[in-house]
Amino acid sequence: MGSYEDTCTALTIALAARAPVLLWGGPGVGKTSVIEQLAAAQGWHIETVIASICDPTDFKGMPRDAGDRTAFSPPDWAMRVAEAAPMPSLVFLDEISTAPPSVQAALLRPVLTGAVGDLDLPESTRFVAAANPPEQAADGWELSAPLANRFVHLDWVVPARVISDGFVYGFGQVQVPTVDADAAVQHVAAARRSVGAFITARPDLVHRMPTSSADRGRAWPSPRSWDAAARIIGHARAARASAGVRQVLLAGSVGPSAAREYLAWERHLDLPDIEQALASGGDISLPETPDRIVAVCGALVAAILGDPTRARCEAAVNGVLVQVAEAGHVDLATVALRRMSAVVRDSGAMLDAAAVVHFAGLLAKMGALKASA
C-alpha cells in the first residue's frame, strides 16, 4: 500500500489517462469529498450515481418500441453528461459494492466503452467509483470479476495527521500533476513494449484470475488490465511521477503480486542503446534472453518509425535484425521487419545477402525491397 500522497497522485494520473478508478475505503474516510473536490478543481461536470439504489435500466437504458426495432433510451444522468460537452465530465459511481449482481452486469458496458443505452458518452468522460469493503458495507456484495477487472483499484486510507491538519488549518486541494500529452504518447508506447517483453518472459501472468471471490473483486492480471497498466504508467512517466506512484498504479491495475514481478523484471532489464547501435551501422551487443530480445526489437521498430532514413533502415535490418536472427530468433526479427517494412521500402534501403537469406519469405511477400549486389 502506498502513502496517502502517492495514492492521491495515482488517482489524478489514472483519471488523466481516462482509466476507470475504484477507491476502496471504510465509511466516512472522505472518498466522496475528494472526488467532488477534484472535479471542482479541474472544472469538470460531475454526475453522482448511487449504484446501490439503481436498477439495470439506469445503465443499459430503458427499452422502448422504435418501430422495427427495440431502442434503449439513456437515463437522465447520461443525458446530462452528453449535454455538458465539450466540458469534460466525471461520472461518480458511489456505493458500487452494494450494487446487486444485475446492476453490476449492466455497468460492464458503460465503464468499458462509455455507451449507455443508445447513447455514446463524450470521449472526455471519466468514471470513478467508491466502495466500502463488503464486510463494512450495508448489504455488501463481492464485486464481480468482469467489473473489477475494468477498474484501477486504489486503497483510500487517510492518515490521522491529514485529518488533524485539515481540522486545524483547513483541508487542502488534491494536487494535480501536469501530464505532457505529447510525451505521454511516447511513454505509453514504450510501456506497451515493456509489458509485451515481460509477458514473453512470464506468460503465466497474461491472465491469472484469482480463485477466491474476494480476490476476484480486486485487481488481477488480464490482457485488458495489462493494457490499462501500460497506458497509466506511460502517463505517470509523462507526469514525472515517483516510483511509489507508479507502483501504486501498477498494483491497482494488475494486482500487487504481478506488479512486484514486473517491477523486479524491469529493474534488471539493462537493454542496449538502440540509437547508438543505429549510429554504428547496426552493431549491437544483444541480451541473452528472449524477453529482452523482444524489448530490443520493439525499441528498434519505434526508432525507425520515428526517423526512417536510408542509413538507419539499413543499419536496422542489415545490422540489428540480422544479428537477432543469427542469435536464433528469426521469428522475432521477422515480426520486427514486418512492422517497419513500409518505411524501410520507402527509404530506398539496400539489403545485404545475410538479410535476404534470413528474411527471404517476408521479402518475397513484400516484393519491393532491393538487395545489394
Image (spheres, grey):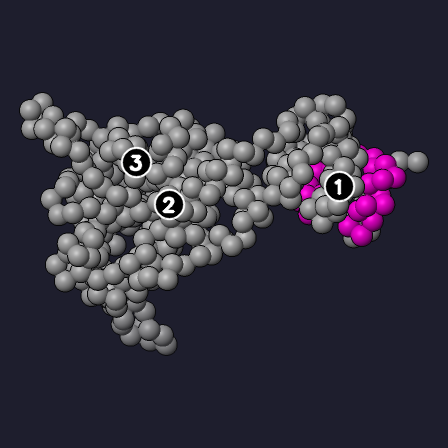
> Is any atom of residue 80 visible in this view?
no
Amino acid type of disc 3? Answer: Gly
Q: Residues within 10 Å of mark 2 (few under 14, many from 20)?
A: some
Q: Is residue 55 magenta?
A: no
Name the spot of residue 144 as percent of width and height, x first: 31, 62
Could you tell me which quadrant the N terminus lies in? top left
Q: Earlier in the sequence, mark 2 or mark 3?
A: 3
Q: Is residue 146 above or below residue 354?
A: below
Q: CA distance from mark 2 to mark 3?
A: 11 Å
Residue at disc 2, secondary structure: helix
Q: Nearer the viewer, residue 107 or 322?
A: 322
Mark linked to residue 256: 2
**Residue sitting at x 16%, y 27%:** 172
**Residue sitting at x 15%, y 29%:** 162
Taking the image as shown, residue 124 lies to the left or right of residue 267, namely left
Q: Is residue 93 above or below residue 240?
A: below
| Residue that extends furthest to the bottom in the rendered view of this protein | 68
Residue at disc 3, secondary structure: loop
Find disc 1 in the rendering and name its residue: 327
